[in-house]
Amino acid sequence: MMTVEQVLATQKANVETLLGLTAKAFEGVEKIVELNMSASKAALAETSENTKAMLSVKDAQELLALQSSLMQPLAEKTAAYSRHLYEIATGTTSEFTKAIESQASEAQQNFTDILESAGKNAPAGSEAAVAVMKSAVAAANNALESVQKAVKQATDVAESNFTAMANTANASAKSAAKKR
């Protein structure tokens, strides 16, 4: 059975975890705001430069060449922005995942300890019921570990797909720019 001190310590740990996760969430939002501000400033400066360049064009062929030269950097910058945004999101999500896994592990251990204590203090003849309960807990723990592994694998596949997509988009933009 948990003592009052253990309950208070658990509550304190939960509050500290919540505050830490809130700080991480705000940190992620700050990074996204900084990224967007920097991207907006760069886009404004580039728009100004590109407008000046377009106004100085003398014929249609020079205009097509200018447009072609602007496409590749735009695609590269878009891919870089997306990659940076993805890194911020996965970094923040990773912190949440670690905290949740830690809390789940601690809760499992506490439950196992309570179950052990209950098993030791159980009346004679209840060994079979305690064994069934321990077996059910072990099965639930195994299922949780399997789910966590599956989520990790899915995350890894999504990250690989995102990287491949960004590389393909970048290569396509370079190829299209060369053809013009």
Image: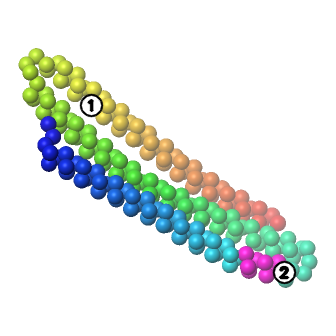
Q: Helix, strand, or loop for circle 1?
A: helix
Instruction: Answer few, some or many: residues within 10 Å of disc 1's Cα (few below 14, many 20 plus, some between 14 and 19).
Output: some
Position in image of residue 56 (x %, y %): 85, 83
Instruction: Report, in whole angstroms, how far the alpha carbon at label 1 lies from the one at label 2.
Output: 72 Å
- Please give the name of the residue rendered at 52% of the width and 51% of the height, measured from the top-left corner: 159
Classify residue 27 by image quadrant: bottom left
Q: Quadrant of the N terminus?
A: top left
Please give left or right for residue 84 compared with residue 153 in the image: right
Q: How is the image coloured?
A: rainbow
Q: Is 50 located above or below residue 140 in the figure?
A: below
Helix, strand or loop: magenta stretch: helix
The amino acid pointed to by label 1 is Ala
Would residue 135 be counted in the magenta stretch? no
Q: Is residue 64 toward the left or the right of residue 70 in the image?
A: right
Residue under label 1: 138
Q: Position of residue 132 (x, y in %)?
A: 23, 22
Foreground pick, 93 / 79? 93
- Sequence order check, earlier mark of 1 and 2: 2
Say which amino acid is labelled 2.
Leu
State which quadrant residue 83 falls in. Answer: bottom right
Where are the magenta residues, as a range? 47-54
Q: Residue reaching furthest right?
A: 59
Find numbered disc 2 in the image and state the secondary structure of the residue it sits on.
Answer: helix
Report if residue 48 lies within the magenta region: yes
- What residue is shown at x 79% (from left), y 81% (from top)? 52
> In the displayed structure, would residue 127 be above or below residue 56?
above
Q: Which residue is mark 2?
A: 55
Asked whether 159 or 84 is in front, the reply is 84
- In the rendered image, residue 29, in percent from the top left (x then y), is placed at 49, 63
